[in-house]
């Protein structure tokens, strides 16, 4: 069962961060600002929570690379994202406050953190030319044009 802790701090993420095989037995425990990681046959080590959080986004961006994005012509601002290897498809909606997908990963992130971006969302962002969710959100902000304090000068004819 996915919860607010193991969605970010998981044994699978620890294996990837340490460059281990996916079958390597790993045990993790939560400490204040680090995660204690024990790999069978090795001494325990600590990995910062910041490293796990960065890996959380980086892993989803990396997983988005092989996905096929198609803009939907029947609904504005909607995209279909297909994983051709798994034969799955999800609908992603582009909004000014983010990209929203029908997948469980994004729904879990929204439930636990109130925001987020899944691999399908990152695929749409890349399709639109954005490297990150924050780049997209910054581009959505409207910057007002300052008004000129004085009226233009009248030219003598």
Image (cartoon, rainbow, N blue to C red):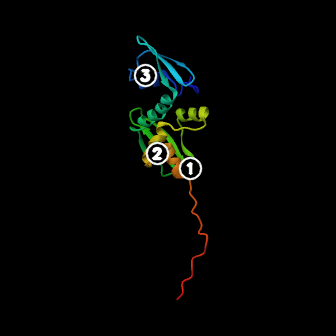
Q: Residue furthest bottom?
A: 157
Expressed as whole percent of the image width and height from the top left, the position of residue 105 reads: 53, 32
Residue at point 59%, 34% (across, down) = 113
- Can residue 76 be seen in the rendering of this structure? no
Expressed as whole percent of the image width and height from the top left, the position of residue 25 reads: 44, 15
Image quarter of residue 18: top left
* Front disc: 1 or 3: 3
Dot 3 falls on a residue whose secondary structure is: helix
List the residue tagged with mark 3: 15
Image quarter of residue 116: top right
Crowd class of label 2 (few under 14; some 14 to 19; many from 20; radius 10 Å): many
Spatial CA distance of label 1 from label 3 is 35 Å
Residue at point 45%, 35% (across, down) = 58
Crowd class of label 1 (few under 14; some 14 to 19; many from 20; radius 10 Å): few
List the residue tagged with mark 2: 125
Rendered image: mark on residue 96: 1
* Front disc: 3 or 2: 3
Q: Are marks 3 and 2 in contact (CB under 8 Å)?
A: no
In the image, residue 153 above or below residue 98: below
Q: Work out whether mark 2 precedes mark 1 in sequence or the reverse, and give the earlier one.
A: 1
The answer to whether 41 appears left or right of 92 in the picture is left
Dot 1 falls on a residue whose secondary structure is: loop
In the image, residue 27 above or below residue 71: above
In the image, residue 110 above or below residue 10: below
Spatial CA distance of label 2 from label 1 is 12 Å
Q: Are marks 2 and 1 in contact (CB under 8 Å)?
A: no
Dot 2 falls on a residue whose secondary structure is: helix
Residue at point 51%, 42% (across, down) = 91
- Can residue 83 be seen in the rendering of this structure? yes
Nearer-the-camera pick, 41 or 85: 41
């Amino acid at each position: 069962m996915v919860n607010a802790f193991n969605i970010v701090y998981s044994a699978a993420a620890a294996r990837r961060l340490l460059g281990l095989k996916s079958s390597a037995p790993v045990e993790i425990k939560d400490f204040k600002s680090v995660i204690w990681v024990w790999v069978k046959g090795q001494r325990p080590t600590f990995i910062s929570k910041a490293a796990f959080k960065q890996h959380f986004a980086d892993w989803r961006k990396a997983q988005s690379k092989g996905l096929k994005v198609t803009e939907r012509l029947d609904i504005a601002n909607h995209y279909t994202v297909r994983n051709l290897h798994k034969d799955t498809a999800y609908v992603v909606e582009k909004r000014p406050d983010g990209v929203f997908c029908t997948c469980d990963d994004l729904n879990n992130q929204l439930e636990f953190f109130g925001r987020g971006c899944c691999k399908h969302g990152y695929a749409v962002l890349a399709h639109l030319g954005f490297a990150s969710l924050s780049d997209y959100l910054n581009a959505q902000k409207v910057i007002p044009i300052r008004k000129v304090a004085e009226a233009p000068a009248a030219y003598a004819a």
